Amino acid sequence: MFSKVLIANRGEIAVRVIRGCRELGVKTVAVYSELDRDALHVRLADEAYALGGKTAAESYLNTDAILDVIRRSGADAVHPGYGFFSENADFARAITDLGVTFIGPPPEAIEVMGDKISARLAAERGGVSGVPGTTVFITDPSEVVEFGRSHGYPIAIKAAYGGGGRGMKVVTDEASINSAIESAQREAKAYFGRDEIYMERYLENPRHIEIQVFGDQQGNYVYLAERDCSAQRRHQKLIEEAPAPGLGDEIRRQMGEAAVAVARACGYFNAGTCEFLYQDGGFFFLEMNTRLQVEHPVTEMVTGVDLVEWQLRIAAGEPLPISQDQVCVTGHAIEVRINAENPSGGKFMPSPGPLTKLRTPSGYGTRWDGGYEAGDTISQYYDNLVGKLICWGKDRDTAIARTLRALNEFDVAGVHTTIPADIAILEHPDFAAVEHSTKWVEDVLDLKNLVSSKGDAPAPVPGEDGEPATVRRTVEVEVNSKKFSVAMWVPETPATALPAGAATKAPRPKRSATAGGASSGSGSVAVPMQGTIVKVLVAEGDVVEAGQTVVVLEAMKMENNIAAEKSGTVKTVKVKPGDTVGSGDVVVIIE
């Protein structure tokens, strides 16, 4: 087993891996950006090193900085988590070139499966069919036009590297092709560091079923049941469950064996997930994620397998501890992703900011995998996942009831979360009857009257008069960009109770904004959240219609179209691409 593992990630997955390592007696090394200096994963790790920078590109996607920390820390293994470099073969190869173990598949398998086009070809070699699509990168919009004329619409334009729905745009007609290509490439570049894209037919009412597969370095494979991830919005999963309800045993077996065949076809080992689209009794291979999935806890809950432990042991050269006929599935588990988003009106707008209160549920069969605690700040520069609620029950009905009970126990303030929408999904008869699909949340679920609240922030603690006493405090310091905790005796000066990372100046007044981003009827288009302007679509003097997109705002790795609420002529454009804006900032004025 390893002596020290560096986790090249942040948030809840870094916390999950740190805990798994600690249970095995393995030391951990955290890395962090300037904004994550006091993050939970940093507080929990045995050692922590600064990467510098704020954005992912400046920090968690900075290969040289991470390699430098590996050398300085003496880590003998690296766990990539998910996202960032987890499916980057060049990064995995750079790790192994240092003589350090990459806790994941071999770089050659990542190259095959990390590129969704070569993954389709590998699946076909293994006898597994995919959704009709292309096997070359898109280099010109005319290629999408031709594909649409041959296969019809809608078409999915997707990031060739990475997964999780990032960098995926659905094209419904020729007019939207150019903007979809540009948006998909921007998102893919921001989240995965690469902007290659490809296309395939977009099935309109499928269920999203995935198989957890594991292989060891001795050539053994098992599949650990399946998960249903059909409750999605913007191609991002909201709720996952295991096992997938409503599937016959024969289909489960066929999908499991197909997943193993795909893994064998590329010489895979360690944890991986084969994703399939299931519709009308048949299934199509979608892609293989060469990493641990966000939703891995539901598989752990129904199989009793610690997947992080398996990852570590297999990376250390140990064989799989069980064979396929020893896999046992018991009960049902549901995972709810708690995201910092405002689901009011079904818009799911990003909601970064200070997390002033967070009380999580507990109880029998209830688990919380979180990346934040009360007082932490959820940044606009990273993914908006606060954490994951996982509930187990003896059957699906029990799991749903337990999850609803747990969701109603949450006490969150400072940011909006997806909890109100999660409750609406789980309470809906379509979900109970397994009549939902990947488009159900957006096309069927009625959230137009849903209203979310940020909760009540705690009142500031008033200061006191008089000479302060001297007290012992622990201060976090950096020496040569390595983090240390130092005890100091300092004056006891009462401070205003502010969340970590909050500014001490007066808060920016917020304008009333619709979910589309325009203040109601005023002509002043305001952004509903902080973020970065990536595109300005209007100029002064342009005539615009109500509902027309005027700027594109990136927040939490998602692009959001900010629209005019009234028709008129653009009087002023107050921003340009690259500008950072705050919640309530006016970006365009329309007369």
Image (cartoon, rainbow, N blue to C red):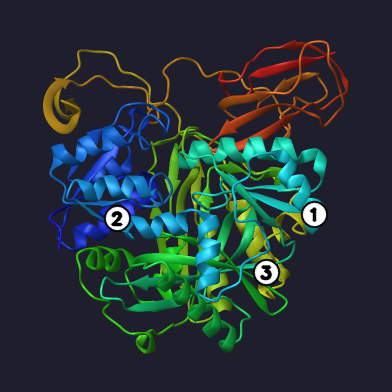
Q: CA distance from mark 2 to mark 3?
A: 32 Å
Neighbour tally class for label 3: few under 14, some 14-19, many 20 plus, Cα within 10 Å: some
Q: Residue at x 28, y 13 (%)?
A: 465
Q: CA distance from mark 2 to mark 1?
A: 42 Å
Q: Between tags 2 and 1, which lies in front? A: 1
Q: Between tags 2 and 3, which lies in front? A: 2
Which residue is label 3 attached to? 431
Is 131 above or below relative to 577? below
Under mark 2, the amino acid is: Val
Q: Position of residue 466 (x, y in %)?
A: 23, 13
Left or right: 131 as drawn, with respect to 26:
right
Q: Position of residue 410 (x, y in %)?
A: 49, 53
Q: Are marks 2 and 3 in contact (CB under 8 Å)?
A: no
Would residue 583 be visible to someone looking at this image?
A: no
Of callouts 3 and 1, the N-terminal one: 1
Q: Residue at x 67, y 61 (%)?
A: 438
Which residue is label 2 attached to? 17
Q: Between tags 3 and 1, which lies in front? A: 1
Under mark 3, the amino acid is: Phe
Q: Nearer the viewer, residue 121 or 287?
A: 121
Q: Nearer the viewer, residue 302 or 187?
A: 187
Under mark 1, the amino acid is: Tyr
Where disc 3 sits, the SS reads: helix
Q: Nearer the viewer, residue 252 or 350?
A: 252
Which residue is label 1 attached to? 153
Would residue 4 be visible to someone looking at this image?
A: yes
